[in-house]
Image (tube, rainbow, N blue to C red):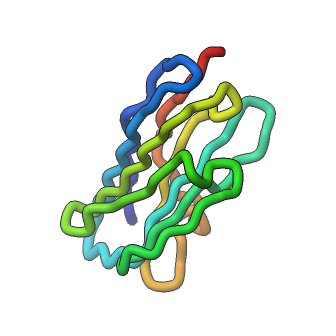
């Protein structure tokens, strides 16, 4: 079973930036994609960004142009560089990984998340 550990969340002012990290660990990992999600209080968890092993990236419209996802495949680590943060970006951020055709969240696997709070 994969374990996910997110870090890097903080309290920042609107317009600021943050870099989140997520390290995946476990036996015989063969990760072919990684992603970020977030959940604000009272809202459903939403997908934010994803990256494949080959470096193809996709973003939710709400973060496109402001967030950049990247990964270090050798370290099974994914990053989320966030710029021009807005109060509506405040949420707990979680990562996910795809092994084979299955995403970790399909098995109910999530990390503890990392809190991002953007003050206006």
Q: How far from the left and from the top, in percent, is residue 70? A: 37, 59
Quarter the C terminus occupies: top right
Residue 62 in the image: above or below residue 54: above
Q: How far from the left and from the top, in percent, is residue 62? A: 70, 49
Q: Total marks drawn?
A: 0
Residue found at the far bottom of this picture: 100
Q: How far from the left and from the top, in percent, is residue 66? A: 55, 46
Quarter the N terminus occupies: bottom left
Give the residue at x 51% y 48%. Answer: 67
Direction from residue 100 to residue 45 in the image, left or right: right
Give the residue at x 38% y 74%. Answer: 55
- Occupied quadrant, residue 47: bottom right
Residue found at the far left of this picture: 74
Q: Using the image as rendered, state which of residue 37 and residue 18 is in the foreground.
A: 18
Q: Using the image as rendered, state which of residue 100 and residue 33 is in the foreground.
A: 33
Give the residue at x 53% y 29%. Answer: 116
């Amino acid at each position: 079973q994969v374990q996910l550990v997110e870090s890097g969340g903080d309290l920042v002012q609107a317009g600021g930036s943050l870099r989140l990290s997520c390290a995946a660990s476990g036996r015989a990992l063969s990760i072919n994609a990684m992603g970020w999600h977030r959940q604000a209080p009272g809202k459903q968890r939403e997908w934010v960004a994803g990256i494949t092993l080959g470096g193809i990236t996709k973003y939710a419209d709400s973060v496109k142009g402001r967030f950049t996802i990247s990964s270090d495949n050798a370290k099974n680590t994914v990053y989320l560089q966030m710029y021009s943060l807005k109060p509506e970006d405040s949420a707990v951020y979680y990562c996910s990984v795809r092994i084979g055709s299955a995403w970790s969240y399909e098995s109910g696997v999530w990390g503890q998340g990392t809190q991002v709070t953007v003050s206006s």
